[in-house]
Image (tube, grey):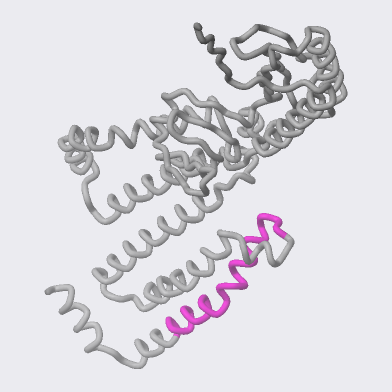
């Protein structure tokens, strides 16, 4: 009530000098508002950004454009020499806004283009995937906002010691509730550090398979081959076995062709030689791992095992290569008049 009365008393005693002060205060505010773009531009130029379009897209420039009108309003209030209670509130609001502006500006300036993160990516060997640094960037930003929040709470007048004590009393409940979140965050750091996969890799877990689209604090998002998105908690994905198909350097082709029992061994040997020759000339087959063997006799025929590696890595490319090899093998069998065996059974009838 005393604060309200002091404000009323201030306005009761208005004279020509106070009116002039008001006009000057309005002028100060208008000057800072009208020239906020120019002032922001000049300050950002200190960072030697020459491209005008880049300056206007700079995070500091955008924040400064909002900050200068607020600074103008605060300076105008200071010039008016208002009651101390009013100025205390204005100063506190201004300081809180300053903390917000600084924290937002610092957080927005943390990008993968910073030299610190370029060096970190270089050491971690993740230059090819800039998105792997997102988790670290988000962590830094989160820490900045938490610090800013504590400073603002202190500025408002709350006792941080009491607040921290209160948090300590409820720490057990919070810890229990946040266990999964903590596990997922830790799992995210494990994924980032060990690099079992990167964004863009094709991976297969116990239950899911697809392309990694993003790694966040809580989960890893995978785009399945059905074009759906699955978010797997980092704690799960870091603790289970997975296959990273994108890390393959070669892919195995393995097939068994059963030849009819009526086929002569010489004809079988000729077919084997021609298949080997075909595979050696095939552009996608790696000749250092070529196996074509008559490995066993089954109840239906002679089994011809073909085991080779190809340089086809992606699934679609592998299927195309596999299909081409199959066609070539069947063509060789047809030219040699050799038939594939089929399940058969001989029945003897006793007279």
- Where residue 107 appears, as percent x and y from the top left, is 49, 50
Residue lying at 75% horizontally and 13% vertically, measured from the top left: 263
Would residue 33 be found to the left or right of residue 310 on screen? left
Q: Nearer the viewer, residue 7 or 245?
A: 245
Asked if residue 132 lies left or right of residue 183, the reply is right
Residue 293 percent across, percent down from the top left: 73, 10
Q: What residue occupies the far left of the structure in this picture?
A: 1
Please tell me whether residue 318 belongs to the stretch shown in magenta: no
Q: Residue at x 56, y 38 (%)?
A: 132
Q: Is residue 29 magenta?
A: yes
Foreground pick, 124 / 184 = 184
Instruction: Let me know if residue 195 appears in the view.
Output: no
Compared with 26, 53 (above or below) is above
At 45% from the left edge and 69% from the top edge, which residue is drawn?
A: 71
Tell me if I can see residue 89 in this picture: yes
Instruction: State the image coordinates of residue 109 (x, y, percent, origin top left).
Output: 56, 51
Q: Is 242 or 118 nearer to us in this picture? A: 242
Q: Main secondary structure of the magenta part?
A: helix
- The residue stretch that appears in magenta: 24-49
């Amino acid at each position: 009530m005393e604060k309200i009365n002091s404000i009323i008393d201030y306005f009761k005693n208005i004279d020509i000098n106070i009116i002039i002060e008001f006009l000057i205060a309005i002028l100060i505010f208008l000057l800072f508002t009208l020239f906020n773009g120019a002032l922001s531009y000049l300050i950002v130029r200190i960072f030697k950004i020459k491209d005008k379009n880049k300056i206007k897209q700079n995070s500091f420039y955008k924040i400064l454009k909002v900050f200068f009108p607020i600074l103008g309003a605060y300076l105008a209030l200071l010039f008016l020499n208002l009651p101390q209670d009013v100025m205390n509130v204005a100063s506190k609001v201004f300081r809180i806004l300053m903390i917000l502006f600084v924290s937002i500006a610092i957080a927005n300036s943390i990008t993968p283009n910073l030299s610190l993160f370029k060096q970190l990516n270089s050491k971690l060997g993740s230059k090819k995937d800039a998105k792997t640094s997102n988790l670290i960037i988000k962590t830094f930003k989160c820490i900045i906002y938490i610090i800013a929040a504590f400073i603002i709470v202190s500025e408002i007048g709350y006792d941080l010691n009491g607040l921290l004590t209160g948090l300590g009393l409820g720490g057990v409940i919070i810890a229990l509730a946040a266990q999964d979140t903590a596990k997922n965050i830790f799992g995210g750091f494990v994924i980032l550090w060990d690099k079992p996969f990167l964004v863009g890799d094709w991976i297969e877990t116990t239950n899911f398979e697809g392309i990694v689209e993003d790694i966040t604090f809580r989960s890893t998002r995978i785009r399945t081959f059905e074009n759906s998105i699955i978010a797997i908690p980092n704690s799960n994905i870091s603790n289970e076995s997975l296959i990273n198909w994108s890390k393959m350097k070669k892919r195995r082709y393995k097939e068994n062709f059963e030849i009819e029992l009526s086929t002569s061994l010489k004809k079988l040997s000729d077919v084997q030689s021609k298949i080997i020759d075909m595979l050696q000339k095939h552009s996608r087959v790696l000749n250092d791992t070529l196996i074509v063997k008559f490995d066993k006799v089954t109840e239906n025929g002679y089994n011809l095992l073909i085991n080779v590696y190809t340089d086809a890595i992606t699934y679609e490319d592998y299927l195309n290569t596999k299909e081409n090899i199959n066609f070539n093998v069947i063509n060789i069998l047809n030219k040699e008049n050799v038939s594939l065996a089929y399940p058969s059974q001989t029945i003897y009838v006793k007279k």
